[in-house]
Image (tube, helix red, strand yellow):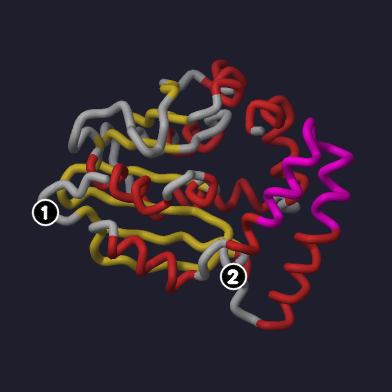
Amino acid sequence: MFDGVASRYDLTNTVLSFGRDRAWRRATRAALGLSPGERVLDLAAGTAVSTVELARCGAYPVAADFSLGMLAQGRRRGVPLVAGDALRLPFADAAFDAVTISFGLRNVADVDLALRELARVTQPGGRLVVCEFSRPTWAPFRAAYLEYLMRALPVVARRVASNPDAYVYLAESIRAWPDQPALAARLVAAGWRDVAWRDLTGGIVALHRATRGAGPDRRG
């Protein structure tokens, strides 16, 4: 499915988010608090536009994605690209100072295993930021947003996306995704510590931040 939307993926995201995708990428980079030279994994990086944003602070980012079509679109961006499964990451234990996943966690087959894998490849004390669609906190806004997801989003996607049917899945997966406290609880269960979140755009998106504990690796 993601191979099928790769060619116009970035344009479609910008149109469907009314241009807010750029601000969400900047907020993710800021939340990671990266220092020059730190190694950061950008999981589910897609075409690596998010990875380029991480490189702006002088960190050494690595883009990883399951979709070869997405990675092919990202070749021109000049960042390291790795094909890899979120449930079995092709990296050594404690390989990264920080890890992040943006709008990809809800697409993996086993969310909890993916969170444990992210912990495995992060150094003790390292940071995680999950940028993902979430639940608007103001009820009237939430109702309007859900209406947009189920009615307007597929219509807009048919005009700009290379595979509009994939965006029906997008809307459904967002509706089924856990709210902010529920995702925080899953992070804790996967071995992450100091879990907190910040709502963006009224809760359409949430940034969940966490720290890798010093205990033993928790493999699936």
Residue 22 in the image, given as x and y percentages of width and height? 61, 46
How far apart, in angstroms, are the residues tagged by discs 1 and 2? Answer: 31 Å
Helix, strand or loop at mark 1: loop
Amino acid beneath label 2: Arg
Which residue shows up at 79% across the image and 41% down it? Answer: 165
**Label 2 environment density (alpha carbons within 10 Å; few <14, some 14–19, many ≥20):** many
Taking the image as shown, residue 145 lies to the left or right of residue 38, namely right
- The disc, 1 or 2, on the residue closer to the chain's N-terminal end is 2
**Label 1 environment density (alpha carbons within 10 Å; few <14, some 14–19, many ≥20):** few
Q: Which residue is mark 1?
A: 214
**Prevailing secondary structure class for the magenta stretch in the rendered image:** helix
Q: Which residue is mark 2?
A: 135
Which residue shows up at 64% across the image and 81% down it? Answer: 138
Helix, strand or loop at mark 2: loop
Taking the image as shown, residue 31 lies to the left or right of residue 142, namely left
Q: Is residue 19 above or below residue 4?
A: below
Instruction: Report the front residue among 127 and 189.
Output: 189
Q: Is residue 99 above or below residue 49?
A: below
